[in-house]
Structure formats: structure tokens, C-alpha cells
Image (cartoon, rainbow, N blue to C red):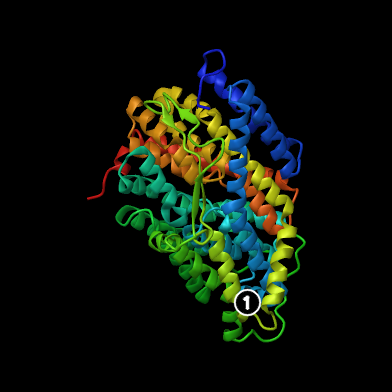
Amino acid sequence: MEWVQNYVTVGNSVIGSACVAAIPLLILFYMLAVRKSKGHIAAIAGLAGALIVAVTVWGMPIKLAISSTLMGAAFGLFPIVWIVVTAVWVYNMTVESGEFEIIKDSLARLTDDRRLQALLIAYSFSCFIEGTAGFGTPVAIAAAMLVGLGFTPLWGAGVALIANTAPVAFGAIGVPIIVAASVSGLDQMAVSSIAGRQLSLLALIVPFWVCITMCGFKRSMEVLPAILVSGICFAAVEFLLSNFHGPTLPDIGSAIASIIGLVLLLKVWRPKQTFRFEGEAPARLEGEPYPAAAVLRAWGPYLVLAVFVFFWGLPEFKKVLNGISGAIFTFGWPALDGEIFKTAPIVRENTVYAAKYTFNWLSAGGTAIFLSGLVSIPLMPKYGFGRGIACFFRTIRQLVLPILTIALILGLAYLMNYSGMSASLGLAFTLTGGFFPFCAPILGWLGVFLTGSDTSSCALFGGMQRDTAIAVGMSPELAVASNASGGTTAKMISPQSLSVATAATGMVGEEGNLFRFTILHSIGMTLLLCILTWLQAGPLAWTIRALP
């Protein structure tokens, strides 16, 4: 069976088609934000709506609709769920073994101020994990750690999602930017440098944003030195690496600089007043501090994790792992691969929409985390492999509903992509003409909301961004970079990210509450990037010129 996508299906109107294509997303939004439904219920409703619209309006054969949904669900289970399960498992082991109490004590002695803990863990540390692994790992780890430190689940998950914004475009060793440049046929360094100039500004703002969200403007000024050190260290290194090295190291280098800067600052400075949430008792540091060796041992699983995900993120190392016999299986998805064709104006001529599924069990990010957990078990006193494996299976049972939610959401995303509904939404933005620079980040935002991945968003809309930019007289490099940058601000409201965060913090079923917590922050940051892109396409065009 061969089926050619159709992007204008309602009254020969691009706008009308886009409105109908948005129905599944509106259902998802309504279920999460208005009905306050549990994540898997909202996902089922959205997926049902998408199946009906894809088959009845877009004319997608039922067999292809079901097959694309199943492929998305499979991608949700691996590699996404594999990352979530292993990340939560490592955290659960540190709790069961008692080592997390030492971690909490060490952080409390460094600072028991919630604002500074958020900057250290939700911003700097999670940015390092984003740079090395990406794909949900940083939110899962940072949110779990914050809750372990005493944040309420909503605050722990919400702060982790908001803070994990600036690094997303350079996550997983720069994969989103690399994909954006590849699918658009543009120079990778040019796209990297422009994205770096946009996101380094966002990196300056995010620490302020996080603190103001937690305690308001006045109390945020009490930790202004920490906010400035955190943001400036990150932004400066991100700018330099993205402009003079490329897309692979900005997150890693920036996060390390931010962590070192904050730790050194806290050696010589402390806020006059400690902030804790309303009704929260002050931290009680009883007895002497733990010996340095015990603290290092307690942090060992996370240090080991960072090392593993760093090496697993290196393209050269991945190539070696994938070269091992039986380490990777790639196959065309049944009843889908080679059967759907993209057509104009998404592509210049009919092109096969490939549907290849890759099971790279050894080089997957979740495998790096799983192995780091196994290596870490001997570091935990009186905690053997038997208890660790038992904890792993308990973690799976704990995450049954989030696993279902993630699979359903990815099924919805793949169905919208393969049916052409996502492209129909994107085409509507191309009608904005000279106003397109303002809308370019919104297209990236929409892509990440749909797929949960900035990489997928860039793959989906990168070519369209380039072609539209050329048509309206905008720099194509700016448009493609803005797609990646705009996608970063949708990560916090993507149903996939919400499922990861609720799973990591024991908030299963409260995805709607978390969505309402983050939605205005997402919109606000996106508007800032829209204004910045519009200015860079006009009066601030000098800011995107090549550096000498």
C-alpha cells in the first residue's frame, strides 16, 4: 500500500486544515488543564481524537494509522521509558541504602536555602545531565533529588522543568542542532552560533526566573550574587563554545562552569536570610558533618552516572558500542516503512517517509544509567546486588502508569507526523509572511509539544523553516536556529516531560496540576524568544553576523 500525505484537507484552506489538525492537541490541553485528568486518561482521549481525525479527514488508511501509533508507542518504551526507569531506579537505591541522607546533609551544610539548592541541582547539575544524555534524563534525576531534599513533589517537578530550558537545544552532545543543520542543509556552525547567541541570553534569565517563581522578586534579590554567578558562568561558556567550537560541548562546559562558580561562591558568601517554603521547618543539622570520604561515597552513584552518560553521549564511543555484534537492530516498521510519501510543499517532490525502528540496547542512554547503577551498588554500604535488582523491579511497578502515558503520547506524536497533521499545522505558520520571524520559535515550540523532543521538532520543521525564511527574505540560519531555541521552552509542558517528572516525584495522575504550574512560564519564555528573533531579523541583524 502506498499513500501520499495531503496537508490541505478542509475546504482547500491551509488555516482550516490546521485548525482541524489541532483538535487532538486541544483535547489534550482540555483534559490536562481544564478537566485535571490523569496523564494516561488525557493521552487516551488525545490519541482517540487523533485517530478519528487522521482517518476521516486526512484520509489515512486505518492500517497505517494503527501502525504509526504502535511505532510511536514502541519508541516511547525504548529509549524513553528505559531512561526514566533507570534514572528513578538509581535514585531509589540511594534512598533505600540510606546514602541519600548523606547527600541531603552535604547539600544542607553547603546551603539549606531552597533557592540555592534549586540553582545547583535543577539548573546547573541537570544542565550537565542534559548535555550528556538528554531525552528526559535530567528532569527525572533533578526532580527526584529535589523531592528527596524536602521539596514538595509539585515544586520539585515544576522547578526542575522550568530550570531545564536553556540547555535543551544543545542536549545529548548537541544532537538537536546537528539534526537541524542536517535536515535544512545549512552550515552546522552557523546554526550553532546563532542558537548560542539566543540561548545564552535565556541562560542569563532562567536563574532569575526560577528564583522569582519560588519566592518573588524581593526575596530573589537576597541571592542575587548566586543568580548572577550561575547565569553568567553558564551563558558566557555557552556563547563561546557554541560560536567557536560547535554544538557538541556548550551544555557540558557551561554546566561545569556554573557548578564550580556556585560552589566557590558559597565558600565565601551566604544569603543573610535562608528561604524555605511556607510551613516548612528549618533544617536541623544534628551532630558533626559526615567525613569527606562518606560524602564522596554517597555522591558516588551520581558521579558514576555522569561519567557513564558522558561517554555514552560521545559519537565516537556510540559508534564503537554499536559496532559490537548484536548491539543494535534496525528494521523497517511493519505495515508502515516505505508506504507513506511526503509531498509538496513539505518536500520538493514525492519522498518516502521512512519508518525505521532502531533497538540500540547497548548504546542507549538508559543502558548507561543502568550500568552506572550496577557499578554503584558496591559503593553503598550493606546494599548488595540482590537488593538492587529487587529495587529495579519495584521501580518498574511504581512507574506502570507513567510508562503507559509515555507510550500513548509518543503514539499520538507519531500518528500526527505520519498522517501529515503536524505538517498541516506547520504550513499555517508559513502564511505569516513578513511576520514569520516572530512565529519561527513558535513552530519549534509546537514541534516539541507534539513530540517531547527538540531533536524531533528540528527534524520535523527544519526544512520548512529554511524554505519559508528564504521566501520571506529572512536569514534561513536564523529561522532554523530559532526552531531549536523555541523548542526549548516547550519542554516543560510537553506531555512526555510531564509524565517523566510526575513519575520521578511520585505525582502519578497529577500531570494536569503540573501542566498548569508550567504553562504560563512556557508561554512567557517563548514570547521573549519570538521578540528576540523578530529583532534579529530586523534592527538587531548585526547580532547574527559571523564573528571575525
Q: Residues within 10 Å of mark 1 (few under 14, many from 20)?
A: many
Residue for badge 1: 377
Asked if 467 appears above or below 451 in the picture, the reply is above
Q: Viewed as shown, does residue 38 lie left or right of 196? A: right
Q: Position of residue 142 (x, y in %)?
A: 60, 61
Q: Viewed as shown, does residue 283 lie left or right of 168? A: right
Asked if 405 appears above or below 123 in the picture, the reply is above
Task: Report whether residue 326 is seen.
Answer: yes
Dot 1 amino acid type? Ile
Task: Report whether residue 492 is seen.
Answer: no
Kindly identify the residue that appears in the image at 49 percent across and 56 percent down. 328
Q: How many marks?
A: 1
Q: Position of residue 36 (x, y in %)?
A: 76, 40
Kindly identify the residue that appears in the image at 57 percent across and 85 percent down. 292
Quarter of the image for residue 287 reads: bottom right
Q: Viewed as shown, does residue 296 lie left or right of 88? A: left
Q: Position of residue 452 (x, y in %)?
A: 56, 45
Kindly identify the residue that appears in the image at 71 percent across and 38 percent down. 44
Q: Nearer the viewer, residue 207 or 125?
A: 125
Q: Position of residue 347 (x, y in %)?
A: 40, 28
Quarter of the image for residue 241 reads: bottom left
Asked if 183 appears above or below 255 in the picture, the reply is above
At numbered mark 1, what does the secondary structure look like: helix, strand or loop?
Answer: helix
Asked if 496 appears above or below 271 in the picture, the reply is above
Give the residue at the far left of this rendering: 548
Q: Nearer the viewer, residue 40 or 120?
A: 40
Give the residue at the far top of this rendering: 11
Q: Nearer the viewer, residue 417 or 430?
A: 417
